[in-house]
Amino acid sequence: MFIDEDVALSYAERFLEEKSKEWGEEGALRLDKENSSSDGDTLIALYDTIAYLDHGDEKQRLGGNMPIKVDMRTGTCRLLSFEEVLEYINKGLIQ
């Protein structure tokens, strides 16, 4: 049984909230839900600073942040590796 995309996004939000505590004060972060995508098995959740997402502030845009991978069967979240990012770009799940 698979979870739906909204549930997967909520798992990714919680994961991002916890991870951002480890990263320190980089600015408030939020998922970029409009640019996140799913192939049915996996949700790839992108994120950036609120200053960039809401106001287009390029100076606050994150560089090199790895997307969050959510397993649509288990809800398990983790950050993608660089190699996985390239794989998902080739599959068209990340632009």
Image: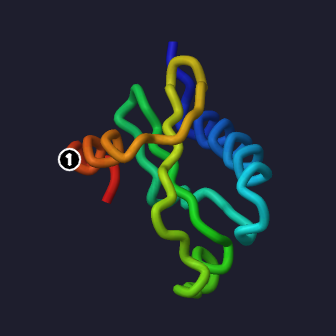
Disc 1, SS: helix
Q: Quadrant of residue 35?
A: bottom left
Counting every numbered tag in the picture gives 1
Residue drawn at x 67%, y 72% is 50
In the rendered structure, the answer to whether residue 31 lies left or right of residue 85 reads right
In the image, is residue 39 above or below residue 21?
above
Residue drawn at x 53%, y 33% is 70
Query: Outermost residue toward the top?
Result: 1
Q: Quadrant of residue 25?
A: bottom right
- Check disc 1 and give the amino acid type: Asn
- Placement of the C terminus among the 4 image quadrants: bottom left
In the image, is residue 4 above or below residue 68?
above
Residue drawn at x 55%, y 31% is 4
Query: To which residue does mark 1 refer?
Result: 90
Within 10 Å of disc 1 (Cα), the crowding (few <14, some 14-19, many 20+) is: few
Could you tell me residue 10's position as x and y percent? 68, 41
In the rendered structure, the answer to whether residue 29 lies left or right of residue 48 reads right
In the image, is residue 10 above or below residue 36?
above
Could you tell me residue 24's position as x and y percent? 77, 60
In the image, is residue 44 above or below residue 55?
above
Residue drawn at x 50%, y 26% is 71
Could you tell me residue 6's position as x and y percent? 60, 40
Residue nearest the observer in this picture, 21 or 5: 21
